Image (spheres, helix red, strand yellow):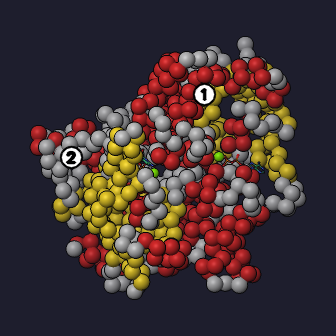
């Protein structure tokens, strides 16, 4: 409830959930010689994203971030399967129940929703010039005549720090960061209402990264669009998200207003993430979290963080902590929430 | 005394018919530096996107040939290495970790096959047991195991897992030089530290030198001995990593350092708001 209120203050636009996810479970299910192996990458996740909101998802490698947003974007394929729960979008009147009637999302995808996959600089067709990708992905959705369309595309590329002549290039002639910006341009040029972006700025230097984040913010603000932004980079979350969810081993550990989460982490894992950031001028040896990320095919009992948690008590290995309202106005799943001291 | 790696006036031109008009462009412009054979080090290359870092890496690996200037490894001009045996011997000593693991691994090839093939090719591991042992040992160093990777394809693993497999693969031949292009871009801070700490151990214990190409100035500062900063193909600043990154002198380096986003929402979002065109 508090989230809704704070949002209302900030934007003065009636708060509205554009995305509602309830009890979502999506597993990779493989059968090898009769042995069934389940990777529970998305395990009972509920969340909402409002109009005009940038919602971040952070968490360590293989915690299920990409799996979660793939499921939200309706972009899953075998062996991944939705086991339970629902994903519903509501684009001003047009509502889409992604796993109720999947065929509905297709036409809506590029008009309302764009999804930038992780490592997606390789979606560019290697044997065709970049301009063809723009023509194929964006032309139809923008309703602009040829000249207006290309002038808009060129302008957009310039804003991302690219020479518009990259349109004439083949992907292999471009650097990693140039290709990454082109995929961002492709996904944002038609100004969708909902953007789902998975690690879209990993290949960029910090100056270009700022321009790119500024552009994403611009497109978002102009359209009052919603964004789900996945990255392991906490500074990027600090820079552009309004709310932040921390994922651990396929579940949400904590969620809340970004500022509150940084100032007052309630979950020991959040505290670790924020306390372990390296900084220039500081050469202390950084310890990584003890132990290994858990195997999602056989996650630890009870709280999945318990084998690595400095605060774990006996109860933690027996009982699963559920998401509860936290002291700082968000939600947290921990029996000892709030007892953390930053590492 | 020969250098492990030496670059003298290395320049790379790309012909660009149609693209950027019909000129050629200098992707790498007169780069000079050397790594000593006696003192292994971590040598960081940072700089602008498109400034020629990956092109430089490809030349070190013998995958691209300099347009002018010379690049030598262990006293031999890399461009002049001819013949299969000499080329294999060179490749065993200089191993790559490529940018974007989603591109580096063919989606139709099982990941363990990459590791076994590397063990076979460079270690001569002829039986299955030896190949598996070499693959598992390398995976353990990066916090994975053969059991987790066996039989799986690249789309079945997360970005960070793939990036670690790419590092593990490079370790198998016991190289003298690892050329790592953005090896930690997709991993979280904690794993990032464990990979860069691994680089440090490789340098100290196994005497491996490492070319560390990264956009992450914090880890470059944390583990590198020396650093060069590149812009538009040129090295604009170089020297001891701590000195250069604490007190950069060139405008671009100063801007780059100043642009590192602080891990603080109020400060970081103010910077991004400043970059927006419309409010
Ligand atoms: N097709 C698949 N079959 C089986 N397991 C899979 C498949 N795809 C992903 N996984 C597993 O699901 C888990 C979660 O992966 P996911 O890609 O969602 O992680 P992530 O949080 O995005 O990590 P990263 O930050 O490294 O990208 C990992 O253990 C991964 O190996
Ligand atoms: N095969 C090629 N043909 C033409 N131009 C190329 C080719 N490969 C690279 N270039 C150009 O050379 C320049 C340097 O590219 P490079 O990939 O070395 O940059 P980088 O420093 O690695 O950038 P990033 O940080 O974005 O990965 C870029 O302008 C790129 O377009
Ligand atoms: S529930 Fe227990 S193990 Fe889990 S985070 Fe809280 S204290 Fe740690
Ligand atoms: Mg991912
Ligand atoms: Mg590169």
Q: Do the residues labelled 2 and 1 touch (CB within 8 Å)?
A: no
Mark 2, mark 1: which one is toward the viewer? 1
The 10 Å Cα crowd at callout 1, few under 14, some 14 to 19, many 20 or more, is: some
Question: Residues under labels 2 and 1: Cα distance?
Answer: 40 Å
In what quadrant of the picture does the C terminus of chain A appear?
A: top left
Q: Quadrant of residue B178?
A: top right
Percent coordinates x, y for residue B64 in the rendering: 77, 38
Percent coordinates x, y for residue A107 in the rendering: 52, 77
Residue wearing tag 1: B117
Residue wearing tag 2: A303
Q: Nearer the viewer, residue B257 or A254?
A: A254
Q: Quadrant of residue A180?
A: bottom right
Question: Going by the image, does B35 lie left or right of A254?
Answer: right
Chain letter for the residue marked with disc 1 in the picture: B
Q: What element carries label 2?
A: loop
Q: Ligand 3: does it lie within 8 Å of the C-beta at label 2?
A: yes
Up/down of A293 relative to B72, above or below: below
- The residue sitting at the left extreme is A315
Q: In which quarter of the image is residue B275?
A: bottom right
In what quadrant of the picture does the N terminus of chain A appear?
A: bottom left
Taking the spot 55% from the left edge, 17% from the top edge, the residue there is B127
Up/down of A91 relative to A47, above or below: below
Residue A309 visible in image = no
Up/down of B143 relative to A58, above or below: above
The 10 Å Cα crowd at callout 2, few under 14, some 14 to 19, many 20 or more, is: many
Mark number displayed over residue A215: none
């Amino acid at each position: 409830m508090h989230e809704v209120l704070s949002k209302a203050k900030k934007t003065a636009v009636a708060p509205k959930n554009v995305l509602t996810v309830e009890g979502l479970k999506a597993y990779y299910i493989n059968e090898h010689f009769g042995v069934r192996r389940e990777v529970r990458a998305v395990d009972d996740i509920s969340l909402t994203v409002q109009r005009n909101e940038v919602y971040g998802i952070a968490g360590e490698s293989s915690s299920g971030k990409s799996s979660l947003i793939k499921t939200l974007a309706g972009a899953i394929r075998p062996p991944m399967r939705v086991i339970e729960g629902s994903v519903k979008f509501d684009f001003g009147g047009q509502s889409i129940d992604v796993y109720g009637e999947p065929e509905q999302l297709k036409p809506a995808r590029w008009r309302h929703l764009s999804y930038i996959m992780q490592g997606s600089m390789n979606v560019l067709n290697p044997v065709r010039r970049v301009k063809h990708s723009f023509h194929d992905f964006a032309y139809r959705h923008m309703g602009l005549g040829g000249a207006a369309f290309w002038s808009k595309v060129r302008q957009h590329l310039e804003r991302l720090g690219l020479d518009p002549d990259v349109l004439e290039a083949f992907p292999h002639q471009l650097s990693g960061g140039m290709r990454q910006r082109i995929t961002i341009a492709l996904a944002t040029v038609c100004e969708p209402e909902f953007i789902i972006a998975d690690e879209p700025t990993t290949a960029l230097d910090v100056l270009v990264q700022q321009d790119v984040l500024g552009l994403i913010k611009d497109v978002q603000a102009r359209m009052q669009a919603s964004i789900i932004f996945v990255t392991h980079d906490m500074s990027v979350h600090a820079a552009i998200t309004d709310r932040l969810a921390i994922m651990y081993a396929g579940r949400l550990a904590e969620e809340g207003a970004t500022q509150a989460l940084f100032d007052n982490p309630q979950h020991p894992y959040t505290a670790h993430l924020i306390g372990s950031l390296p900084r220039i001028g500081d050469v202390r040896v950084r310890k990584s979290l003890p132990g290994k990320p858990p195997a999602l095919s056989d996650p630890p009992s009870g709280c999945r963080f318990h084998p690595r948690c400095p605060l774990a008590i006996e109860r933690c290995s027996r009982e699963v902590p559920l998401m509860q309202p936290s002291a700082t106005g968000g939600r947290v799943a921990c029996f000892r929430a709030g007892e953390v001291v930053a590492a | 005394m020969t250098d492990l790696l030496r670059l003298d006036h290395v320049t790379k031109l790309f012909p660009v018919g149609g693209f950027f008009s019909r000129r050629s462009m200098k992707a790498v412009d007169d780069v000079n530096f050397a790594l000593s054979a006696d003192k292994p080090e971590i040598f960081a290359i940072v700089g602008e996107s498109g400034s020629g870092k990956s092109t430089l890496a490809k030349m070190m690996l013998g995958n691209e040939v300099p347009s002018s200037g010379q690049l030598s490894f262990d006293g031999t001009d890399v461009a002049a290495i001819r013949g299969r045996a000499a080329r294999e011997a060179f490749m065993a000593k200089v191993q790559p970790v490529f940018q974007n693991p989603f591109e580096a691994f063919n989606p139709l090839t099982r990941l363990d096959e990459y590791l076994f093939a590397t063990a076979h090719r460079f270690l001569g591991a002829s039986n299955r047991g030896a190949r598996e042992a070499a693959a598992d040992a390398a995976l353990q160093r990066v916090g994975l195991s053969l059991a987790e990777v066996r039989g799986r394809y690249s789309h079945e693993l997360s970005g960070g897992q793939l990036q670690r497999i790419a590092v593990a693969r490079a370790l198998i031949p016991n190289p003298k030089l690892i050329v790592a292009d953005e090896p930690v871009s997709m991993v979280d801070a904690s794993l990032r530290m464990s990979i860069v700490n691994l680089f440090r151990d490789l340098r100290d214990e196994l005497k491996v030198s490492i070319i560390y190409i990264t956009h992450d100035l914090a880890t470059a500062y944390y583990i590198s001995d020396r650093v060069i900063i590149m812009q538009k193909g040129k090295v604009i600043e170089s020297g001891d990593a701590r000195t250069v990154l604490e007190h950069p002198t060139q405008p671009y380096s100063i801007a780059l350092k100043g642009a590192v986003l602080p891990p603080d929402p109020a400060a970081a979002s103010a910077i991004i708001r400043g970059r927006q065109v419309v409010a």
